[in-house]
């Protein structure tokens, strides 16, 4: 992967862009107090930075700048057809952050966003209000850590804690139930210390072989850290999901995934899991085109995928072999009805 | 290549001397070069600055790893002879604002810069020039936001009559910090070029497309497979030789070619 030596780059959050209209709001000032040495640059709207023409996502990821903004317009979206709904009828997602501190080579955000900068929307309360309105009509299953990894930045922004508190509060007074999923590759257990346990907050850990983590999931927690963290959360009473998704093809993939499962089953009692998901890497045609442009030496970007109705995936023989292998291995450890296999 | 964009010759002179740049044979704009740096003198004002920037980046075929650095004096309320790396450019003619990325370490102080199209004899802007907004707009057509920088040195507090006497001092007094920045950009550009993917597979493709009896669609598939195999350091000559020994290649027609291409694909995984 094309990465540059970090010695040339400013540290993450050396520069923080702040929308003029929120600069005096408590949520913004309290975040800025955490970065006393940062250069603050005032902007009119976050898109003035985030949506500039001709940005270099890869360079920007080497020195994350932060943008503090207010989210306007629609705040809750219907789940994407490429995302696993886990059979939830009312499947939604929201983005209180855009972009991720981690740098996974296969991440679709590289194709989705023009900028590698992180955007934090400070008006979480407005998102909560929209969720409350929806709960008047029906239950809601909401993914709150898509397009980012909120637990990777829990020490700074405390979004996991705020969501847990909200779920616990709203479910005591709402006519319908809110369930959220927080997807993460973070294994730093101290991030969970202040979180109130809730049966309606599912922590979903992306589980990958060590080879994939070392080569393609730059900056993320190790496999053992993720597994230990998942195990602790199960013991604490949180529902925990393991996501073997996306499976990444590499030489000797079968050995890598088998080793991963051996470690996972040694660390975690699979019968205590909420569920697991399995899916091989897939990405939209548009996103892959952008990824290939910005990662000219990436074996993941230039894998000879098959295109089915605008989505690239591994050739059917490889896709089926990978997914069926893992499904079959998992079947020995967890009930089949708890395994969600990705279907197009 | 590092492209230095200066409005006036006196701004460029200390840089020309520092880097021993030689005048290039170019009739449109004064241009000075060595193997690493190309410096162009644009003349004052937005239109001249935009034209010269676009001209030099087109003429010398700007590469994505290159850097564009506008270095020059400006008016402003900040201390005279202070040098600043610009993090925000406000075009007072159009009302638009531009933000060069601030990704790289430097010892410069940072400031916002107001950019207009006329000489001001009074004003209360921290920094004011007549080229930066135009240079940004021209350069962004060629190069990404992280490769465009603006270094401005305060020559006067809105007393343009005093400028001529201090230009040289402004540049000379800050030449070491400017040099440090340029050297960093050079190292980053070198690193990007060094990590660029090899196009060796193109050579293989030209040979193999005939052996596979490729249609246009098959050519695209073959190119994709070869690119992936090169990146993954798969032994393509070994696979091809094996296919030739087993008389799978060369193919006599498109039908044979399709089967051979599928055989080749399976050897990669």
Image (cartoon, rainbow, N blue to C red):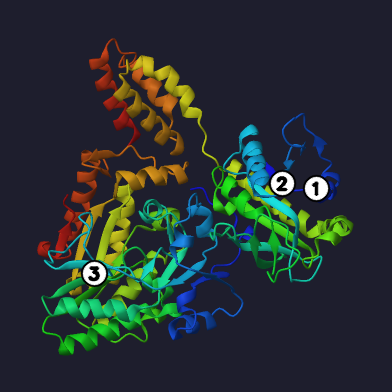
Element at label 2: strand
- Whether the residues at callouts 1 and 2 have beta carbons within 8 Å, the answer is yes
Residue at mark 3: A241
Whether A182 is drawn above or below B86: the answer is below
Residue at mark 1: B12
Q: Is residue B46 left or right of residue A309?
A: right
Q: CA distance from mark 1 to mark 2?
A: 9 Å
Farthest residue, direction right: B165
The image position of residue A134, as x and y in percent, is 17, 76
Whether B268 is drawn above or below B177: the answer is above
Question: Residue A300 or B58: which is nearer the viewer?
Answer: B58
The image position of residue A204, as x and y in percent, is 27, 69
Q: Are marks 3 and 2 on the same chain?
A: no
Q: Chain of mark 3?
A: A
Determine which quarter of the picture holds residue A162.
Answer: bottom left
Determine which quarter of the picture holds residue B106.
Answer: bottom right
Determine which quarter of the picture holds residue B93.
Answer: bottom right
> Residue sitting at 84 percent across and 60 percent down?
B161
Question: Residue B186 or A1: which is nearer the viewer?
Answer: B186
Residue A225 seen in this snapshot? yes
Count every numbered label the image shows and give the total.
Answer: 3
Residue A295 seen in this snapshot? no
Element at label 1: helix
> Residue sitting at 18 percent across and 64 percent down?
A333
Element at label 3: strand
Q: CA distance from mark 3 to mark 1?
A: 62 Å
Residue at mark 2: B4
Question: Residue B158 or A210: which is nearer the viewer?
Answer: B158
């Amino acid at each position: 992967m094309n990465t540059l030596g970090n010695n040339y780059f400013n540290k993450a959050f050396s520069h923080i862009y702040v929308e003029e209209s929120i600069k005096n709001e408590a949520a913004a000032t309290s975040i800025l107090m955490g970065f006393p040495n940062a250069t603050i640059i005032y902007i009119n709207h976050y898109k003035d930075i985030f949506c500039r023409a001709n940005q270099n996502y890869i360079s920007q990821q080497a020195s994350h700048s932060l943008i503090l903004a207010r989210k306007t317009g629609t705040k809750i979206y219907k789940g994407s057809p490429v995302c696993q709904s886990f059979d939830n009828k009312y499947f939604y997602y929201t983005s209180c952050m855009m972009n991720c501190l981690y740098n996974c080579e296969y991440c679709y955000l590289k194709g989705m966003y023009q900028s590698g900068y992180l955007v934090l929307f400070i008006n979480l309360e407005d998102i909560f209000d929209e969720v409350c309105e929806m709960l008047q009509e029906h239950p809601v299953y909401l993914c709150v850590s898509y397009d980012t990894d909120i637990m990777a930045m829990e020490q700074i922004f405390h979004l996991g804690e705020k969501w847990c508190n909200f779920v616990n509060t709203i479910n005591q007074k709402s006519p319908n139930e809110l369930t959220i999923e927080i997807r993460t590759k973070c294994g730093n257990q101290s991030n969970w210390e202040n979180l109130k346990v809730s049966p309606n907050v599912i922590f979903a850990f992306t589980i990958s072989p060590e080879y994939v983590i070392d080569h393609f999931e730059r900056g993320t927690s190790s496999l053992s850290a993720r597994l230990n963290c998942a195990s602790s959360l199960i013991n604490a009473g949180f529902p925990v999901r393991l996501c073997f998704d996306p499976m990444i093809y590499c030489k000797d993939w079968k050995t890598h995934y088998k080793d991963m499962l051996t470690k996972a089953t040694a660390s975690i009692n699979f019968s205590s899991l909420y569920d697991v998901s399995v899916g091989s890497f897939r990405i939209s045609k548009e996103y892959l085109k952008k990824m290939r442009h910005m990662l000219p030496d990436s074996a993941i970007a230039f894998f000879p995928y098959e295109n089915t109705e605008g989505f690239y995936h591994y050739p059917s023989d490889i896709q089926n072999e990978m997914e069926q292998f893992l499904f079959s291995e998992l079947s020995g450890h967890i009930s089949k009805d708890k395994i969600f296999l990705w279907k197009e | 290549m590092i492209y230095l964009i200066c409005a006036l010759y006196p701004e460029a002179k200390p840089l020309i001397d520092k880097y021993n740049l030689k005048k290039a044979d170019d009739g449109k704009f004064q241009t000075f070069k060595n193997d690493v740096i190309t410096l162009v003198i644009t003349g004052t004002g937005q239109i001249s600055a935009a034209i010269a920037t676009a001209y030099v980046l087109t003429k010398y075929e700007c590469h994505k790893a290159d850097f564009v650095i506008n270095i020059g004096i400006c008016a402003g309320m900040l201390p005279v002879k202070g040098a600043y790396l610009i993090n925000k450019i406000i075009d007072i003619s159009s009302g638009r604002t531009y933000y060069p990325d601030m990704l790289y370490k430097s010892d410069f102080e940072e400031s916002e810069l107001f950019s207009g199209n006329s000489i001001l004899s009074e004003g209360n802007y921290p920094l004011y020039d007549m080229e930066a907004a135009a240079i940004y707009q021209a350069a962004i057509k060629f190069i990404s936001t992280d490769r465009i920088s603006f270094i401005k040195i305060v020559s006067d507090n809105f007393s343009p009559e005093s400028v001529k006497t201090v230009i040289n001092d402004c540049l000379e007094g800050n030449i070491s910090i400017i040099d440090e920045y340029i050297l960093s950009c050079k190292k980053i550009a070198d690193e990007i070029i060094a990590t660029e993917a090899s196009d060796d597979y193109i050579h293989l493709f030209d040979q193999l497309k005939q052996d596979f009896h490729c249609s246009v669609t098959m050519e695209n598939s073959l190119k994709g497979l070869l690119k992936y195999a090169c990146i993954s350091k798969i032994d393509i000559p070994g696979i091809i030789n094996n296919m030739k020994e087993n008389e799978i290649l060369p193919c006599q027609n498109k039908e044979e070619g399709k089967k051979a291409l599928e055989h080749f694909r399976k050897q990669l995984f």
